[in-house]
Image: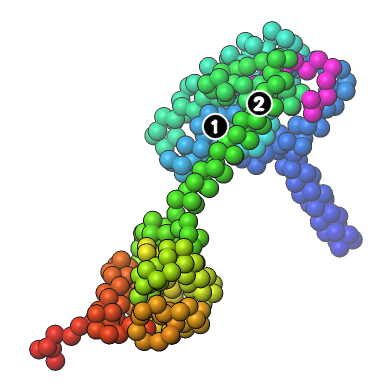
Amino acid sequence: MQALKSQLDRIVRERDDLARQLEASRFDALTGLLNRREFHDIVCERLQEGQSGSLLMLDLDGFKLVNDQFGHTTGDVLIRRVGARLSEWSPPGTLLTRYGGEEFGVFVPHARGDDAAPLCEALLQLFRKPHVIDGRALVVTVSIGYTDCGNLGLDELLRRADIALYAAKHRGRNRAVAFGSAMETLPAARRELASIVVNLQQQLMAVRDEARTDALTGLPNRRALEETMATIQADGTAPLGIAFVDLDHFGMVNHAQGDAAGDRVLQQVATALRTAVRQDDQVFRKGGEEFVVLMPGITGKAATLAATRMLDAIRTLNIPNQGGTGGDCLTATVGVAATPGGAAYWSVLEQASAVAMRAKETQGRNAVHAWRPSVPKDAG
């Protein structure tokens, strides 16, 4: 008998828990207002029963700034306060929902046509009063779009209220706008404007890319190199190897075969370098016959070996060496410098460039030269 009673008590507790969970599932967890599904179901039922009224869509103005300036915890408190104000304001029989984020829906029964306007004005005045949160007075106004329900279905009412809400936002926010037939063109205008914005953004990106791309070789140019260096310097902790590649006697190519031939050589070299580097490496044309390769994550011998692959790729092109020394094909002098992180990356690039230039002055062309810090004569 006792066992049966215990089982019955357990079943009753489970039933009550399920009932509480079912009841809780009807409401928004943050505000306690109806959730969207429950709101839809009840409004649809009332409309089917022939109940008249108005549908309002509300959106808080500038709410993102609250989250950005004071944090999401303050934002959540504000949303709860908004829900409480709506509940205090609502006429009898009104249905309230938090549609999501900072957007709310309101169904006011029996408020037809001009009846909704004073209700919206009262809401606007209500929202202009500050919310005091953690000693701060926050004023967050609201934009409202509303429509008479007539004999329409909920989907159409939501569409109309949303169009009116967009009109309220477009006209300066902190106001209520009723749906009118003239607004039917707004969604198309909005889509057209959005399309124009997207096209302008794409054009801007194309211009930006063009300004950072070497027109001859298709490689990122010096401006792109400077921006990339600034970006990685902001971290300043990752290992980085840098190769400075300077073609040997390139001026003789232009002199012997003309500028067009020189341009073709630069294009071939750019392709060879792109092929020789790793996937994460970046190749830039710094200017003239000078190229820079950024090699993240490698230093020391690994960086030197990578630079050797680049030099081999240029040699393999077998471009005739016009008047130069050291062989029958075009070569390059490569300077390599690296840092395990924490150094000024621009100084690493300068070291790679300097060691290459010194090699050219001392008959060290057609080779890879790794930068080594100079040691004072009286050291050790």
In this rendering, position of residue 376 left or right of residue 223: left
Confirm whether the magenta stretch covers residue 359: no
Residue at screen point 27% across, 75% down: 357
Residue ID for mark 2: 189
Nearer to me, 162 or 332: 332
**Disc 1 or 2, which lies upstream in sequence?**
1
Tell me: residue 2, above or below residue 115: below
Q: Residue 254's x, y, as percent?
A: 39, 67
Q: Foreground residue, 150 or 220?
A: 220
Q: Check contact, mark 1 vs mark 2: CB within 8 A.
A: no
Identify the residue at horizontal 24%, vertical 84% (top origin). Answer: 362
- Write down the quadrant of residue 186 in the picture: top right
Question: Mark 1: few, some, or many residues within 10 Å (few <14, many ≥20)?
Answer: some
Task: Please tell me whether residue 152 belongs to the stretch shown in magenta.
Answer: yes
Q: Find residue 225 and report its horizontal and vertical position in percent.
A: 39, 61
**Mark 1 belongs to which amino acid?**
Arg
Above or below — where is 52 with respect to 376? above
Q: Give the range drawn in magenta.
A: 144-156
Numbered badge on residue 81? 1
Name which residue type carries label 2.
Ala
